[in-house]
Amino acid sequence: MSLKCATVLAVLFAVVVHAGSAAAETILVYGDSLSAAYGLATREGWPSLLQERLRDQKFNYAVVNASISGETSAGGASRIRTELSATRPAVIILELGANDGLRGLPVAEMTANLERIISASEAAKARVLLIGMQMPPNYGPRYTASFAQAFAELAARHKLPFVPFMLAGFAEERDLFQADGLHPIAAAEPRIVDNIWPTLEPMLRH
């Protein structure tokens, strides 16, 4: 299936689910495998769980997940305008950069790519929630520090709502990750929603 077809199907799915709520606005989840329910059923991933919470909390938003496993900040920057045009989100949850870090790519390049995504989103009148990421200590203190700091600086520069680390509180719990040690199991996905929700919820009342 092509990326374009997948995006169209995701939008159609959101429309069908919310057929009774014509005024529902869109939350675009724009990330990598950590948001693409890698190794899990789609319904187990945190974007689907977020949709359930929105429904339970009576928020009239439809979640569209445009995350791609293996995506880098460069890949995200290259397709952001297409995704924004297709989904016209009110809110975009930006979760990219982990694959840049795992490949040891220059932090400055990642920052520039994320800046392009943020600027395009802001130009499209979408409110951006920036999700930060942290690297394991084996990447060295200089790289890991500059990597984490890049997200904080982007959030400050653009005055964005910011979640420093979506895996906070359980990143060290090995039994909550799949065999690769990188991707959470289904039981950990609700904790990602819990980490994001306190920052996202005020944005939805905007």
Image: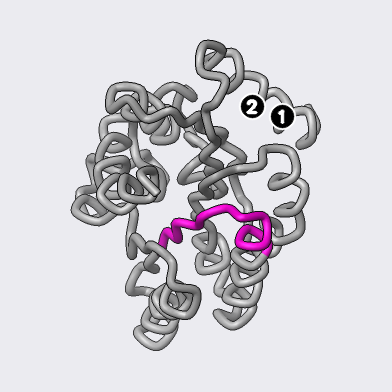
Q: Position of residue 109 (x, y in %)?
A: 64, 78
The residue depicted at 67 percent of the width and 62 percent of the height is: 123
Compared with residue 90, is residue 38 higher up or lower down, i.e. above or below? above
Compared with residue 17, is residue 5 higher up or lower down, i.e. above or below? below
Res. 83 mark: none
User: Contact (CB < 8 A) between labels 2 and 1?
Assistant: yes
* Residue 121: in magenta span: yes
* SS under mark 2: helix
Q: Residue 1 is drawn in which quadrant?
A: top right
The residue depicted at 24 percent of the width and 47 percent of the height is: 174
The amino acid on which the numbered mark 1 sits, given as a three-letter code, is: Ala
Q: Is residue 65 left or right of residue 206?
A: right
Q: Which residue is mark 1?
A: 6
What are the residue bounds of the magenta stretch?
Answer: 120-132
The residue depicted at 66 percent of the width and 42 percent of the height is: 88
The amino acid on which the numbered mark 2 sits, given as a three-letter code, is: Ala
Q: Is residue 108 left or right of residue 153?
A: right
Res. 10 mark: 2
The Cα atoms of the two marked residues, 2 and 1, are separated by 6 Å
Q: Nearer the viewer, residue 189 or 141?
A: 189
Compared with residue 128, is residue 186 higher up or lower down, i.e. above or below? above
Q: Is residue 41 left or right of residue 115?
A: left
